[in-house]
Image: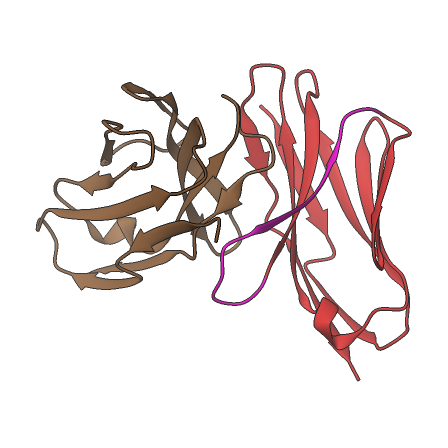
Amino acid sequence: EAQVTQNPRYLITVTGKKLTVTCSQNMNHEYMSWYRQDPGLGLRQIYYSMNVEVTDKGDVPEGYKVSRKEKRNFPLILESPSPNQTSLYFCASSPGTTNNEQFFGPGTRLTVL
Amino acid sequence: EDQVTQSPEALRLQEGESSSLNCSYTVSGLRGLFWYRQDPGKGPEFLFTLYSAGEEKEKERLKATLTKKESFLHITAPKPEDSATYLCAVQASDYKLSFGAGTTVTVRA
């Protein structure tokens, strides 16, 4: 089954404790992206990648890191999480090198205390 | 700055009661407009892409249309399974994607 998977689905952590949210897709897609979704604000892009070893900042990259060492994986790293990073996070992928017609993962709900 | 505004924020419909959702936008060079559906606890699911004014796309009870300033998502004779949040997104000439906050549709049997 074609899908985007994220782990963990739920995470409660404390300020400053480094964490990684994994994202994997099995569709051989070139483009992958991370979004956060907050009430009333819509989805906002954090980082994206058009191919292996190619990443770029989205609208809200501060406090986040990403890497794209393999085509299928695109982990999101929070080196020192803060409470304002409490949010619902989505990973997405799409064929080609743009953000057309994206397939989204199930989401990761992160709470930073 | 690109902006996407969706209205209404919430819409409650009786089964069979047709209605429309609005997505108005300002963008520097529209490359494409996308509609997604999001069910509670899930990620958005792609519905349509519209590229130019006058274009229309249909899928089951949903029909999306596009003008130079807005897009409409028409829901004809909705069923309870059409209950979801519908998201609109615009892609600018630099491929930057901006999402609206969504319209939550509830269809009562």
Residue occupying the far front of the picture: A1
Q: For residue B67, what is the image quadrant?
A: top right
Q: Residue at x 33, y 36 (%)?
A: A72
Q: Residue at x 79, y 47 (%)?
A: B22
Residue occupying the far left of the picture: A17
Q: For residue A109, what is the image quadrant?
A: bottom left
Q: Is residue A72 magenta?
A: no
Task: Give percent across and percent down for residue A84.
Answer: 28, 50
Chain B as rendered: colour: red
Task: Give percent across and percent down for residue B33.
Answer: 70, 33
Quarter of the image with the N terminus of chain B is top right
Left of A71 or right of it: where is B69? right
Quarter of the image with the C terminus of chain B is bottom right
Q: The chain drawn brown is chain what?
A: A
Task: Give percent across and percent down for residue A52.
Answer: 31, 22
Q: Residue at x 23, y 62 (%)?
A: A11
Task: Give percent across and percent down for residue A16.
Answer: 9, 48
Q: For residue A48, what is the image quadrant?
A: top left
Residues in magenta, as a range: B39-52
Residue occupying the far bottom of the picture: B109
